């Protein structure tokens, strides 16, 4: 299932909070699954180390699409109106019965911190923001210029589509998280689409593309792009792409590994788009990595999700066997287990090095300084009614070392530390230590066997409560398909 794509051929060589769109989790699942299943084993020829940093002939001839900001603004407003009408009529949500008085009250109250559950705030809202982002992106606006539209769409909803006070955390998660999720799904839909295809293949590709990026799919249908035959844009296909899946069993222990463990089966889909270490990076998210994990835990389908994309990168040193780069990354993280919850929006300055050990093996290392814009983290003494986690900004460090064979990561070691200052919740600070050791060994063809150990430690110093130390371990065994 894992493969590298040829640019020349275009071929592969939980419930939403209040008004958030339904089935958001399933939409992301479908997106990652479709791309992973579309990756074939067809390998591209080896590229020389240096020319990839120069523009290709096709991309040099491409011109940016014409921007339509007013159309984007109209679509953002239409998205909110459509979702609100659904909640008001079919959903019969009491909070959707807005009036002029509720609008005035929300404007007077201003933004507050809400008490919604973790999955709604940290996962469903970024997906919702991805719809706003796509409305701007698909109307010709570049990555950074899409931010005002995600902010505006979120502000519109918070102020005028609900009787409840507008939420600060929703504004941040929807707008910033929406940019990451929206761009990733937009690019994955591009990989699926083929404007040169016809008949049933064209119909299937357009349908899958719309499932990945609904706003884009709607726009393509209205504009007639879904039926028009024309050359397929070269930048719809990354130079490198890999997708893989794992299926196995995990043992989640709280305090001691085998003491009152929680046993679950899990499935995880992962992908790597582009190459952050050596690839040609001209635009935000020309290279990104992502994964989503599903478990048999009740009332929570998704337990882990992460997106990390390069915003900009600068090459520091380059040779035939070594590459050293400094990159700025945007990250979205989400962990919701029976033992703890943590996740949010971050930026990270990352020093990356890749060393070619042999023709097929390599060693990748990175050290990142993270700035957490807003993190949610589980707490025993949350100050918001009905909420079991705190909110706050923070800083952190993350180190990673990977030994791989071609696109197969055989051994991965990760260590991280973060400190979060509580803005809303129990008051105080959280210090988090994380560790991850993964071994995924090839067995036959594209099948592998592996094991993974995850460690999570939280040291919490509360202003008005006793300090808390919490340790959680997760041991996995799995079968991998590449």
Image: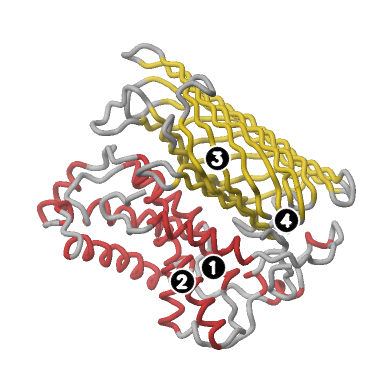
Q: Which residue is mark 1?
A: 189
Q: Which residue is mark 3?
A: 249
Q: Is residue 481 at least partly visible in the picture? A: yes
Q: Is residue 79 above or below residue 395?
A: below
User: Which image quadrant is residue 58 in?
Assistant: bottom right
Distance between the Cα atoms at labels 1 and 4? Answer: 25 Å
How packed is label 1: few (under 14 Cα within 10 Å), some, or many (20 or more)?
many
Residue occupying image coordinates x 69% and y 34%: 413
Answer with mark 2 or mark 3, whichever residue precedes in sequence: 2
- Residue placed furthest toward the top: 466
Distance between the Cα atoms at labels 3 and 1? Answer: 31 Å
Kindly state the secondary structure of the residue where label 2 is placed.
helix
How packed is label 3: few (under 14 Cα within 10 Å), some, or many (20 or more)?
some
How packed is label 2: few (under 14 Cα within 10 Å), some, or many (20 or more)?
many
Q: Which residue is mark 4?
A: 446
Residue occupying image coordinates x 57% and y 71%: 192
Answer with mark 1 or mark 4, whichever residue precedes in sequence: 1
Q: Which residue is mark 2?
A: 210
Answer with mark 4 or mark 3, whichever residue precedes in sequence: 3
């Amino acid at each position: 299932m894992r493969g590298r794509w040829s640019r020349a051929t275009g071929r592969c060589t939980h419930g939403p909070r209040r008004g958030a769109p339904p089935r958001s989790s399933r939409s992301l699942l479908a997106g990652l699954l479709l791309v992973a299943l579309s990756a074939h084993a067809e390998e591209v020829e080896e590229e020389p180390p240096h020319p990839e940093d120069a523009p290709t002939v096709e991309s040099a001839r491409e011109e940016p699409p014409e921007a339509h900001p007013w159309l984007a603004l109209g679509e953002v407003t239409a998205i909110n109106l459509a979702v609100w009408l659904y909640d008001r009529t079919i959903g019969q949500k009491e909070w959707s019965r807005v009036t002029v008085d509720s609008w005035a009250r929300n404007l007077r109250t201003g933004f507050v911190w809400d008490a919604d559950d973790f999955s709604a705030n940290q996962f469903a809202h970024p997906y919702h923001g991805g719809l706003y982002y796509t409305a701007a992106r698909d109307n010709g606006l570049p990555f950074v210029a899409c931010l005002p539209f995600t902010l505006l769409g979120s502000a519109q909803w918070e102020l005028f589509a609900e009787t409840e006070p507008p939420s600060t955390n929703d504004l941040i998660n929807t707008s910033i998280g929406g940019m990451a999720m929206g761009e990733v799904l937009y690019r994955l839909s591009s990989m699926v689409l083929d404007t040169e295809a016809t008949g049933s293949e064209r119909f299937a590709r357009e349908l899958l593309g719309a499932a990945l990026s609904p706003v884009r799919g709607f726009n393509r249908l209205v504009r007639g792009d879904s039926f028009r035959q024309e050359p397929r844009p070269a930048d719809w296909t990354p130079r490198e792409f890999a997708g893989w899946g794992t299926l196995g069993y995990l043992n989640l222990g709280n305090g001691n590994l085998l003491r009152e463990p929680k046993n679950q089966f899990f499935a995880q889909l992962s992908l790597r788009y582009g190459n952050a270490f050596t690839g040609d990076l001209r635009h935000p998210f020309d290279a990104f990595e992502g994964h989503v994990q599903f478990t048999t835990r009740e009332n929570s389908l998704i337990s882990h999700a992460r997106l990390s994309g390069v915003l900009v990168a600068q090459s520091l040193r380059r040779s035939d066997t070594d590459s050293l780069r400094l990159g700025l990354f945007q990250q979205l993280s989400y962990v919701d287990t029976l033992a703890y919850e943590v996740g949010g929006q971050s930026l990270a300055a990352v020093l990356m090095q890749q060393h070619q050990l042999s023709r097929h093996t390599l060693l990748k290392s990175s050290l990142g300084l993270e700035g957490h814009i807003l993190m949610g983290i589980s707490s025993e003494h949350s100050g918001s009614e009905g909420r079991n986690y705190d909110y706050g900004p923070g800083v952190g460090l993350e180190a990673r070392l990977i030994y791989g064979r071609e696109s197969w990561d055989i051994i991965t070691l990760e260590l991280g530390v973060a400190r979060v200052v509580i803005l809303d919740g129990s008051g105080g600070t959280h210090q988090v230590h994380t560790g991850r050791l993964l071994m995924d060994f090839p067995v036959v063809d594209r099948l592998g066997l592996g094991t993974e150990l995850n460690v999570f430690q939280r040291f919490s110093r509360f202003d008005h409560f006793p300090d808390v130390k919490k340790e959680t371990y997760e041991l996995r065994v799995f079968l991998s398909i590449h």
